Image: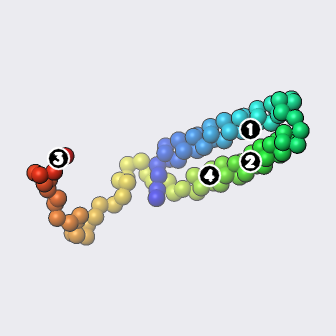
Amino acid sequence: MMATQEQISAARRTIEQLRDQHANDVRKLVRLLESGAMKGKAADKLTEDCRGWEAAFNGFFNRALALVDSTPVRPADSPESPPDLSGRGLGPLQTRDPGMPY
């Protein structure tokens, strides 16, 4: 699939915003845990899990950005897909059944 440069840029901005929001939320949670909001082995485990989660999501967002960056650019004035010139069309025209309540 090809996208316009505008679509690619918008997707990149959205991914970057989600990445930043996620990172801020996870950092806040880790700071909250480290400040003593929760104590003991469960808190240590949750803090460790949050850091692992942050690392995994960073990888996820990096892969998403790489995918967006590798998307071929379609010129803004070209059609989404080439027209079907095969002559096959979409089959017979479907008519509304008068007995159906739609």
Callout 3 secondary element: loop
User: At 33% across and 60% down in the image, what residue appears?
Assistant: 82
Residue type pointed to by label 1: Val
Q: Which mark is residue 101?
A: 3
Mark 4–mark 3 distance (CA, rounded to whole Å): 44 Å
Residue type pointed to by label 4: Ala
Mark before the other along the chain sequence, 2 or 1: 1
At label 4, counting other C-alpha atoms closer than 10 Å, the crowd grade (few under 14, some 14-19, many 20 or more) is some
- Quarter of the image for residue 43 reads top right
Give the mark toward the camera: 1 or 4: 1
User: At 58% across and 40% down in the image, what residue appears?
Assistant: 13
- Between 52 and 66, the one nearer to me in the picture: 52
Q: In the image, residue 61 lies at what x, y percent? A: 66, 48
Q: Name the residue under label 2.
A: 53
Q: Mark 4 and mark 3 in contact? Answer it, CB < 8 Å.
A: no
- Between 35 and 28, the one nearer to me in the picture: 35
Mark before the other along the chain sequence, 4 or 2: 2
Q: Mark 1 and mark 3 in contact? Answer it, CB < 8 Å.
A: no
Callout 2 secondary element: helix
Mark 2–mark 1 distance (CA, rounded to whole Å): 8 Å
At label 3, counting other C-alpha atoms closer than 10 Å, the crowd grade (few under 14, some 14-19, many 20 or more) is few
User: At 68% across and 39% down in the image, what residue appears?
Assistant: 22
> With respect to residue 36, does 93 lie above or below?
below
Mark before the other along the chain sequence, 1 or 3: 1
Q: Residue 26 carries which label?
A: 1
Mark before the other along the chain sequence, 2 or 3: 2
> With respect to residue 92, does 6 lie above or below?
above
Give the mark toward the camera: 1 or 3: 3
Colour scheme in the image? rainbow
Callout 4 secondary element: helix
Q: Name the residue under label 4.
A: 64
